[in-house]
Image (cartoon, rainbow, N blue to C red):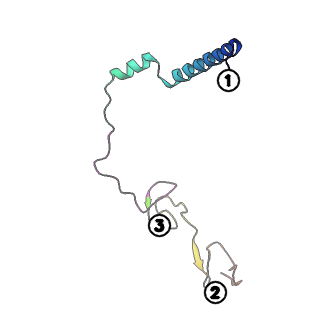
Amino acid sequence: MVFTIDNKELWSMRLQTLVAKIRQAASLLQPPQQQYQAHSSQQLSPPQYPSQPQILPEGVCPNCNNPVSLEFAICPFCGAKLKEIKHKCPKCGKEVNAEFKVCPYCGATL
């Protein structure tokens, strides 16, 4: 590409615009000098961690956050439903929802 005077002026203007945008973006990334000085004068303490890691229970109730067994269908603390309660159909032996009145597999009355 051959640079003529017009091309040089055009590229110079584009370069100045680009530099201005870069400076503007860089100023957004840096905290204002006053805030930086205020924060740098404060003593920061390291974060406090528990002495021993907390062992999570098998499960946690999504309603009250108390520990529950994964086998529980209802939370013993708040009564929240943890999973569908299943029953076995007395006729075909398949698992069905406890709220069903009729077995959807064999039609037996539950």
Q: Residue at x 50, y 25 (%)?
A: 29
Amino acid carrying mark 2 in the image: Cys
What span is in magenta?
Answer: 47-66
- Distance, label 2 to label 3, CA atoms, is 27 Å
Amino acid carrying mark 3 in the image: Leu
Q: Residue at x 44, y 66 (%)?
A: 69
10 Å neighbourhood of mark 1: few (<14), some, or many (≥20)?
few
- Is there CB contact under 8 Å for labels 2 and 3? no
Depth check: give the residue in front, 11 or 31: 11
Specify the label residue 92 is tagged with: 2
10 Å neighbourhood of mark 3: few (<14), some, or many (≥20)?
few
Specify the label residue 70 is tagged with: 3
Specify the label residue 71 is tagged with: none
Measured as percent of width and height from the top left, residue 27 is found at 52, 20
Local SS, label 3: loop
How many marks are shown on the rendered structure? Answer: 3
- Distance, label 2 to label 1, CA atoms, is 84 Å
On screen, residue 37 above or below 99? above
User: For mark 1, what is the residue?
Assistant: 1
Amino acid carrying mark 1 in the image: Met
Measured as percent of width and height from the top left, residue 34 is found at 43, 16
